[in-house]
Amino acid sequence: MRHNNTGYDIALFDDHGRPCMLVEVKGTAGRWENPGPSMSLRQAREADKQGTGFALWIVEHALDPQRATIWNLSDPLGKTARIQFGGQWRKHAVQLSFEELAQLPTQ
């Protein structure tokens, strides 16, 4: 499978040869549990752009052909209620003081 697509692994086509679904495939060695597979920013942007024309396929037990199960999650971002930023995001943030906040223009 080529990995140079922009935000997806597989393009599915309709009977007329037109793309109808873009699919990103993620695998887990064992059971699909929390926190589960992640998507890159590029993949998330493609999912957002395509909406119901995008699916995330999660292959559970991907290394075991006897137990492998494929889960189809269509429009994954459309089913997302929130995106959570845990403590690991702190390294990307800039700390602000209350004095700095008080000086920001507000309406």
Image (cartoon, helix red, strand yellow):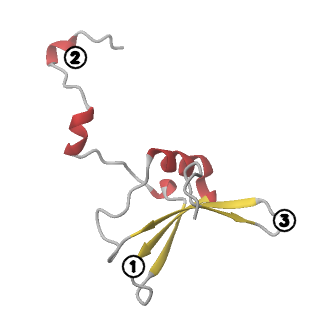
Q: Secondary structure at mark 3?
A: loop
Label 3: how many residues lie within 10 Å, few (<14), some (14-19) or many (20+)? few
Name the residue beneath numbered marker 3.
16
Q: Is 102 rendered above or below residue 38?
A: above
Which residue reaches farthest right? 16
Q: Secondary structure at mark 2?
A: helix
Q: Nearer the viewer, residue 86 or 102?
A: 86
Q: Residue furthest bottom?
A: 66
18 relative to 31, above or below: above
| Relative image position of residue 101 (x, y in whole percent) | 22, 16
Q: In this rendering, would 84 be left or right of 69?
A: left
- Image quarter for residue 75? bottom right
Classify mark 1: residues with Cα within 10 Å, few (<14), some (14-19) or many (20+).
few
**Secondary structure state at the residue bearing disc 1:** loop
Task: Report crowding for label 2: few under 14, some 14 to 19, many 20 or more residues within 10 A (C-alpha).
Answer: few
In space, the residues marked 1 and 3 are separated at their CA atoms by: 35 Å
